[in-house]
Amino acid sequence: MLAEIITIGDELLIGQVVDTNSAFIAKELNKIGVSVYQITSIQDDKEHILQAFKEAESRVDIILITGGLGPTKDDITKKTIAEYFNDTLVRNPDVLKNIETLWKRYVRQTLLQVNKDQAFVPSKAKVLMNTLGTAPGMWLEKNDKTFIALPGVPFEMRNLITTEVVPKLKDKYDAPFILHRTLLIYGLGESTLADRIQDWEDNLPKHIKLAYLPSIGKMRLRLSSKGFNAKQIIDDVQKQIDAVLPLVVNEFVGFEEDEKSLEAFIGEKLTEQEQTLAVVESCTGGKLAGRFTANSGASAYFKGGMVSYATQTKIDVLGVSKSIIDKYSVVSAQVAEAMAQQARQLFKTDYAVATTGNAGPTKGDADAEVGTVFVAIASKSGVFSEKFIFPQPRERVVNKAISMALEMLQKEILKN
Amino acid sequence: MLAEIITIGDELLIGQVVDTNSAFIAKELNKIGVSVYQITSIQDDKEHILQAFKEAESRVDIILITGGLGPTKDDITKKTIAEYFNDTLVRNPDVLKNIETLWKRYVRQTLLQVNKDQAFVPSKAKVLMNTLGTAPGMWLEKNDKTFIALPGVPFEMRNLITTEVVPKLKDKYDAPFILHRTLLIYGLGESTLADRIQDWEDNLPKHIKLAYLPSIGKMRLRLSSKGFNAKQIIDDVQKQIDAVLPLVVNEFVGFEEDEKSLEAFIGEKLTEQEQTLAVVESCTGGKLAGRFTANSGASAYFKGGMVSYATQTKIDVLGVSKSIIDKYSVVSAQVAEAMAQQARQLFKTDYAVATTGNAGPTKGDADAEVGTVFVAIASKSGVFSEKFIFPQPRERVVNKAISMALEMLQKEILKN
């Protein structure tokens, strides 16, 4: 069962927008046994869209289209689909009702003609109701080929994939089972790894495909297989994993597919142990708190945080003593530790994490080298900190600091 | 002058990796007058790669290929290029030297045969030396068509685009000038904006293309044009911008190409006026503070923030009176306003912004409907708040709340 994803929009071709939709769709299709054969991004241009449809139809069974369904003149996907199917656009009363409901609830202005026009769909299309937006999804069939058109707005597209497209494809097609298992390996280069596992790789059964995915400091080694006997596939892949693991025993840290974000992992542990957390941030500026609060169960353990950005705020609001700051400077282990301890007291929590540093690009109040960050953790067993120096740009320093803070906190929680 | 980007790698087709390379390449090519006609992502499969080359060659002048140049068995792009050009691979001594240098500096282990093999390139290829990695870039020509193959590792690819590909393309082709100008517009929906500027849009000259790019809380309106007379293009587009700006005078905040975000705009205004800001967040959980602190000049006006996530934190740390919370509930205009006023006092700032709400997916401590958010602004002229109801998912509620908070703050600052 093969699919092609066609993403439509000039913004993709001029590099104004990164196409994140395709990866999401590909992942969801893989889960139900549909392989993506090609991803094609094209402009809002009628002839080009028609040509892309024709080529895709010759290659695959399912053509998944996103983008170009908006109410404005540059959006031409719907008209072009109607033309491709020798069809006309007719007003769909259910879609109109959905638009009116959304409008009343969220916009509270007069419904314009262009919005009403979004209720027009090709007469041959089954509507996939978009409860989060005014552009309806569409499902059309032609000579055993299925065309599915979805809005390009990511959260609308995602919702339609999950609630409409995936269930309908599962109903329609008897797809094989696809399995990917990705080993996360730290501290080995691509060629060194390949060299070490060469014999194993040469003896892999034909139906298991191997891929090396290098990134900074990490290798991902992916085994993929598909077939109609899911149990057999799982067993075969597991057998190969059992054979390769002893070869990377010191470098293997886990499977990507099992990976839970570190903050979610910490949140679960704290909730289990009925313990609480506060954060106080200088250089990470609120983003560490943002990581925890992004998870909906956070209120069980996350009591709050402070962004003590200005030095005066560290003194006045957080209550770090001015003499410590004067003596050691605001970017120092001593200040980081004082921040963590103050936060733990102020928010009355079991744990508190503090960050202070200079994210760059230029030196700030403190003398510390650009990229210097101190992370401190306070708990009932006391307080400790670590110093890091991260390379520019600013965004990278902040993200690295957040990663290290989460890692330190995780270790501390597992210890207690 | 047309280009196609072909990105090769199974990881793209199974959704394990988002293709960020294409957007970068497209942007850089646009700057030198090369339009990207199509972006095609395909698997590490010989027949498919050959087919994609052939189709691309029939459509465009420049074929830019990334991925599949690594040292391991799953990487087959180089061999396939040699086959497409009826060519053989020969060892390039300069590439070998580069590999040896990199190895000595960063790896300090024995150079393996697979690494040495990376020095093999098609005999017809001009090498684009990759000083950041072992896979060389390649430049081949065939019947006036140019094929350029680059490694898929983003920072290696980017460096080669900037230092090798762009200068060589500029030398070879006499490309037109391409201009994009994108107006950032806050507080207007796509259809309302289209309705308001309809007459202007209908009278746009043929050579100027218009696009609407909606995202949460923001509209981007892009004018694009290209031609060989750069001055004429710039003047023509500017004339249209001058004509449309009066229609969006209250909602226009700047041009995307000047890359200023609303928070950067606010930061500049506050810095100019020597005024200061604090934020206190419940449902936005630190992310609003994160927006301001992402900009390196933030310390001039941003004194700090608090994430008063738990109700008890609002009382104990922020100092909101328990009786107000009991009387009106924690998600209410009264509590939002009290939060803003307390923050303004605590952090001693000119402005303070507060958010409180229920981001969902389930009801929390308060009775408020999922998606309800109150944003309050305190300043020397007092305090006020607005109520919003945003649709799920959680992430969208948080992002919408941040957008509205920024918008309200911007308006308030412009008023004073």
Image (spheres, coloured by chain):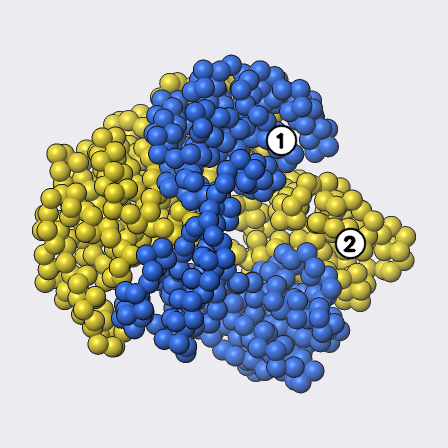
Chain colours: A blue, B yellow
Residue B263 or residue B207, whichever sits in front: B207
What is the quadrant of the N terminus of chain A in the image?
top left
Q: Quadrant of residue B281?
A: bottom right
SS at mark 1 in the image: loop
Q: Residues within 10 Å of mark 2 (few under 14, many from 20)?
A: some
Residue B332 or residue A360, whichever sits in front: B332
Chain that bears disc 2: B
Image coordinates of residue A265 in percent, x first then y, are: 61, 67
Image coordinates of residue A78 in percent, x first then y, are: 49, 23
What is the quadrant of the C terminus of chain A in the image?
bottom right
The reply to the same-chain question for discs 1 and 2 is no
Residue located 21% across and 45% down the image: B148
**Is B302 situated above or below A160?**
below
Residue located 12% across and 34% down the image: B143
Give, as a three-letter code, the residue at label 2.
Gly
Quickly name the residue at label 1.
Answer: A129
Can residue B242 be seen? no
Image coordinates of residue A346 in percent, x first then y, are: 74, 72
Q: Which mark is residue B364?
A: 2
